Structure formats: structure tokens, C-alpha cells
Image (cartoon, rainbow, N blue to C red):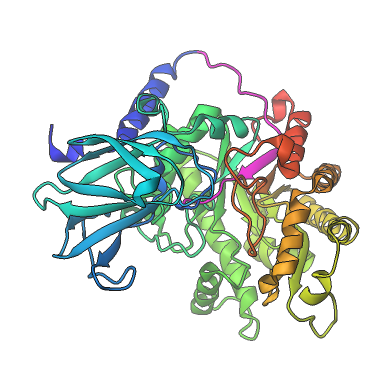
Amino acid sequence: MTNKVSGLLAYGTAVLLAAAALVGAAEKEKADAPARSLLGINLNGPADWNSELPFVDVFRLSRQWISQQEGKPWGQGPKLQLDEHGWVTKLEAGCHATSPILTVKRAPLGKYVLLYEGEGKMAFWPADKAQVLSSEPGRMVVDVKGPGLMLNLNEVNPEKPIRNVRFLMPDCEQTCKESPFRQGFLEMWRTMNVYRFMDWMETNGSKIVKWSDRPKLEDATWTAKGIPVEVMVDLCNRQLINPWFCMPHQADDDYVRQFAALVHGKLDSRLRVYIEYSNEVWNGMFPQHRYAEEKAKELGLGPKERPWEGAGMFHAQRSVEIFKLWEEAFGGKERLVRVIAWQAGGGPYWTDGIVLSYKETGKHADALAIAPYITACIPEKAGKAGGLDAATVAKYTVDQVLDLAETKALPECIGWMKAQKKVAEKHGLRLVAYESGQHLVGVGGGENNQQMTDLFLAANRHPRMGEIYRKYYDAWKEAGGDVCCVFASIGGWSKWGSWGLAEHYDDTPETSPKLKATLDWAKANLLDGQAQGR
């Protein structure tokens, strides 16, 4: 077996076997798709602090190798010599490389198995959290006693550098060959209609331009560029859940064409594909918005004094170009949901007047997507128009925070739903939500008010928040909303927001009101047979 073949991840083999099984079954009569809810889910992004733990191989979400040198501050070692997939090929004298793994607050404990190819020396830090029980070339058994681990690469044989590192959860060494996904992760979201892969694809600020830039199965970690498309397709095939892909804002036509062709060739034919150009191109905090403004200037789109309008026009134009490439790959649009996404609160002026009406963009799409959050963004200081400030809200009780969400923010976002539904109907489109949920967070310095942050965290943990979510989902349905993708699955909460429906992989609906409300509502609002293809 050649080095190239032996260097492939075990997961790559599983994907190939799964694909072969699908091809072999293509001529057989297929079972009906499972019941799907009106809800979809945004999956939490790849990071060593990802508390959802979607993969049994936790090294998939490790941090990129960090160079360390004795006597120098953290991360100040010389530039590492890496191969095209991010594996260390050589270490300078007196140096080592570190990769943080399992930096979440909670993680499964017990006997992990470390597998690898090549030659060198590795060790875990801190040693009291990871006791090596046995070691032989290519395999270690490690008793993990606590999270917050780092894997140190202390020596590398340049002739046979260490690569294809896998760090498998307890009792997963054999099962990982059949499925790379943690079973609890699969079970949690099995009734969802859509997986939106925006964060899995590292969409915000993506540097991907060409197909060769894409994340690959053989990469040392999937936190650098995102999760490979083969993995996302595999996940959707296993659960028969529709994928929602966000094309990188700088991606050229060849990237889009090859991405679409791969999906067409591997995705179960019962599934439909949601296609969106980037994410929140309207949002000035993201590089993709600034990119759209620059492209609009080059193309002479929009008034010079209002460059954000040109960005909206470019978003519409590039979206249609991308849709056509997907239509070519799929031989039509029947299995595609072509999504134009824009701001919920901007009203018809934006979605109708600037985006959908530009070159009749609405005629080339299937859905208008918005993010009708239950919004309370509290700054450090109130603006000129008045409003709440962090010092004021910090003195609230938890019930007062929940009152703010239920009696002010919720009616406001319901108004957005109804207004945007009219826009969608005008253009013959479905109204979908690319993101949804609560949006209690400090902004403009307000995030640094710890007392207010603590209140927001407590409000998100309160049973009443679950009731607000039920009212919110009911309102979306009553407004005529179609698939609604919640933001987000499982993730830690902080001053930057309480986005996860729960905080840790082992949280249960019984202890997580938002999660329980969402899963209960999903089960109670299954689509009928004709609508399940949505």
C-alpha cells in the first residue's frame, strides 16, 4: 500500500463504502423518507471548544498545530514546516508543536484510543488528565480524566512524519469504521428537516476561492477551512435530512460547479438541496459584505453614496449565477431550493425594492430567507433615540428580562415575519428562516457588563424561555412561514450570546427549556407526505 493510500483517513474509507452502498441500492425500491418537521437546525461550527462533540474522533475538531519553543512565550516558536494537509513534517531543535483538543468544560471521560501513522513522539498535557495505559507504534490507549487536553508533538521523523492522527472516544475504535458521528448527536436532530451548514463551512470570512482550496478528508484538522463536503453529504444521507449549503463569497464558478457535481453524485436522491450565497451579506460586520460592496463598485451597481445598496444588488446577481451552476449540475431545479437571504427587519425596501426586484431576481429563486430573531441587543450607552442601556437592564430581574423578550421583542419579530411573508408572496416565493431564536445579547460595549450577561444566561435557562419559544414557533407557522432553521444546535454560552439550544453535548431536554420546546414542537409539527420534500 502506498504512503498516499495509507495516509487517507479511516473516515475517507467509510465515506467511499457508504457511497458505494448508495450506488448499489439506487436501482432498488427506496423506502419512504422519514417524517420531517417544519424546523431545521444550524449546526455549531468546528472548534476545539465545540461542546456538541459531533464526531467520535475528537481530533477532527482540534486546533491547528501551534509552534512552541523552550524559553519563549506561548505560540512563539519558529514557523512550522507543514505539508499540504497541515501535518508537521519537521521540527526545529528545541521546539515542539501543540494542538489543543477537548477544551470544552465537559467531555466524555474514560479510555480513548490514539491512532496515527508515521514515526515520532507524542505526549498529552496536562499529564494528570491523560494517563497513557499502553503504547505501541501507531496506537496508544489513554485514560482521559478531564477536559482541557493538549496533544504535544515532541519529535518527528522527517522521512515518515506523523499524520492521520485520530483520538477516538471510549468504545468507538470499531464503530468509527461504520460511522464517524457520535450516536447522541445523530439522535438529537433526527426529526429536523434541514441541516444548515453555514458554520460547518466556516462561511463567514471564508478564504476559499478555488476548488483546490476546499477542506479535504485528509486534512489534519477540520477547524482550519471547515468540514469537507463529503462529510456533510454523508451525514445527510445517514439521516435523510436535507442539506443547506452556503457558497463561499469569493468562490469562483469552477468551485461552485465541482461542489454541486459532487453533491449531485453522492447525495441521496430523496433529498433536496438548499443553496445560499454566503451568509448575511447584508451585515456590515462580515468580510463578505465588504467584498460585495467592492464588487458592486467595480460593476457600477447602486448609488455611490449608498454602497450598501450596491452590495444588495451584487448579492442578488451572484446568487442567480450560482443557482444556474447548480441547475446545470442537477439537470434542472426540481431538487434545489434556491435561497435569497436578507435582513428580516429591513422591510420591503430591502428585500423587495433592492434585492428581489433587481434584474427580476425573484423569478430565479424559490425562497426568501430571513432571520426573525427575538431581538434585544443592549448597548453600553443608549443611542440618540433613547432606548435601553446595559446599566439599566443589569438591574432587571430574570422575569423582567423575559418580559422584555415576550412583550416587546417577540411582537416586533412577528411583525417582521408578516411583512416579509407579503414580500415573498409578491414574488411567488416561500418564506424560510435561515436563522431563528432568541437574541438577548450585549453590544457596543454592553457585552462587557457581567451582571447583564449573567441575567441573559439565567433567562435562557429559565423554563419560561421554553414557553416563549413555543409561542415564537407557533407565530412563525401562523404567519405562513415555511422551513425555519434554528440557531443553533449545541454550544457554550457567553457574553457573546446564548445561541445554543443547550450548552453541552450531554444536556437533556428536561434540563434545557429551549431544547425541549424545540424538540417537542418539531415532533408536533411534522409535514405531511407531499410536503416532506421541502
The location of residue 528, given as percent across then percent down, is 74, 26
| Residue 378 placement: quadrant | bottom right
For residue 345, side relative to residue 55 (left or right): right
Q: Position of residue 108 (x, y in %)?
A: 49, 37
Q: Does the image show residue 263? A: no
Q: In which quarter of the view is residue 174 placed?
A: top left
Residue 29 point in image, percent of width and height: 51, 13
Q: Is residue 163 above or below residue 313?
A: above
Instruction: Say which quadrant the C terminus sits in.
Output: top right
Name of the residue lying farthest toward the top:
29
| Foreground of the two, 184 or 283 | 184
> Residue at coordinates 84% horizontally, 70% vertically from top-left?
395
User: Magenta stretch mostly in which secondary structure?
Assistant: loop
Front one among 288 and 317: 288
Residue at the far left: name it: 159
Quadrant location of residue 400? bottom right
Q: Which residues are magenta?
A: 29-46
Figure quadrant of the N terminus = top left
From what the image shows, is residue 404 above or below residue 384? above
Residue 480 among those drawn in magenta: no
In the displayed structure image, the side of residue 470 where residue 325 appears, left or right:
left
Identify the residue at the far front of this view.
128
Can you give x and y, in whole percent of width and height, for residue 271 in the image?
Answer: 56, 32
Front residue of 81 and 476 = 81
Work out whether 10 lies above or below 66: above
Q: Is residue 31 left or right of residue 447?
A: left
The answer to whether residue 148 of the structure is visible from this angle is: yes
Q: How many marks?
A: 0
Image point (67%, 56%), residue name: 498
